[in-house]
Amino acid sequence: WEKRTRIPVGDEARPWLFGVARNLVRRERTSNERATAVSRELALTAESSEVIRSSEDSEATAALSELSPLDREIVTMLTWDGLAPREVASILGLSPNVVRVRAHRARERLRAVLGPSDAGEDADTPDSSSAARGRG
């Protein structure tokens, strides 16, 4: 309505309004097409990405939820997204050294929660039988 003083009067108003309506419909259609394309692309990306399937993955996700949001973000960006510490630092507004230290400490906490990652080491731990029962 900022341009209401420029709305034509008389016989010129009708074609002008049709033009305005046509442009609005065109913009809406373009917006819907973009949204559909993005949804399609996200669906394809989700299908091609690894989905959490095993109980070990579920345990890892649960362990990640124990971390602070910042540490969780650092670990996932480094590990799952494959970013370098300097890239993560740039994204999060931290120094690369802070990212490295926080990642190290977060991984130590994850190891403590998850236990040994090697199957051979699992057999030596007293909790291996209860962990095996939980995975079944």
Image: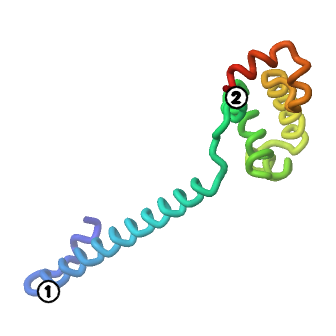
User: Residue 12: horizontal and vertical position, in percent?
Assistant: 14, 86
- The residue that disc 1 covers is 12
* Type of amino acid at the residue the image marks with label 2: Glu
Residue 68 appears in view: no
Q: Is residue 100 left or right of residue 2?
A: right
Farthest left residue in view? 10
Q: Secondary structure at mark 1?
A: helix
> Considering depth in this image, is 23 or 124 the residue closer to the camera?
124
> Considering depth in this image, is 25 or 3 the residue closer to the camera?
25
| Mark drawn on residue 67 | none
User: Residue 16: horizontal and vertical position, in percent?
Assistant: 19, 82
Q: CA distance from mark 1 to mark 2?
A: 68 Å
Mark 1, mark 2: which one is toward the viewer?
A: 2
Q: Secondary structure at mark 2?
A: helix
Q: Residues within 10 Å of mark 1 (few under 14, many from 20)?
A: few
- The residue that disc 2 covers is 59
The quarter of the picture where residue 73 lies is top right
> Considering depth in this image, is 114 or 70 the residue closer to the camera?
114
